[in-house]
Image (spheres, rainbow, N blue to C red):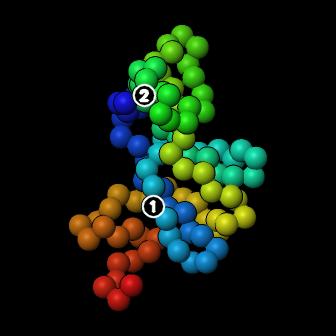
Amino acid sequence: MEYEAGPPTRWHLTLRDGAVLELWADGYGIEDGAYEFSVLVRATEEEQGGAEVVARTPADPGRVMVAVARLATASVQDVHTASAPARDGACVCRPFSWEQ
């Protein structure tokens, strides 16, 4: 598989228990009570068989949206695009601390 829309966006999800989940995806939607994150990729039929394809482009069967994560909306407190990681990997939403 190869990314079709360039590198995915960095996302942070703050869960209700306070944990922060970081993932990379082109975007997300809410489907059946869950946040569904996906990426646009070019994939062979064999590669598509090993992934969860959530959308297809009609004109090009090799270009598909693949799910990368799905979380129940009830378990998520906040979703936002994260700033580019600083040298220490921290995001402005959660300042870096060696104590964490």
The label nearer to you, 1 versus 2, is: 2
Is 74 rendered above or below residue 63? below
**Residue 88 in picture, x, y percent from top left:** 26, 71
Q: Is residue 17 visible?
A: yes
Which residue was labeled with disc 1?
Answer: 22
| Up-down relation of residue 43 to residue 54 (above or below) | above
Kindly state the secondary structure of the residue where label 1 is placed.
strand
Give the residue displayed 60% in from the left and 33% down from the top: 54
User: Which residue is the site of mark 2?
Assistant: 47
10 Å crowding of disc 2: few (<14), some (14-19), many (20+) = few
Find residue 4 and report its horizontal and vertical position in percent. 40, 28
- Label 1: how many Cα within 10 Å (few below 14, some 14–19, many 20+): few
Q: Quadrant of residue 56?
A: top right
Secondary element at tag 2: helix
Which of the two residues, 56 or 96, is positioned nearer the viewer here?
A: 56
Cα distance between the residues tagged 1 and 2: 25 Å
Query: Residue at horizontal 34%, vertical 83%?
Result: 97
Judged from this view, the residue extending furthest toward the right is: 32
Under mark 1, the amino acid is Glu
**Residue 88 placement, left or right of 79:** left
Image coords of residue 32 (percent x, y): 76, 46
Please determine whether, in this image, residue 74 is positioned above or below residue 41. below
Image quadrant in which the C terminus is located: bottom left
**Amino acid type for the residue under numbered disc 2:** Glu
Task: Decide which of tag 1 and tag 2 comes sooner along the chain.
Answer: 1
Q: Horizontal placement of 80 versus 99: left or right?
A: right
Residue 94 sits in quarter: bottom left
Q: Nearer the viewer, residue 14 or 71?
A: 71
Query: Does the image show residue 40?
Result: no
Q: x%, y% of residue 55? A: 60, 28
Query: Considering depth in this image, is 50 or 70 the residue closer to the camera?
Result: 50
What residue do we see at 61% from left, 47% from top?
A: 36
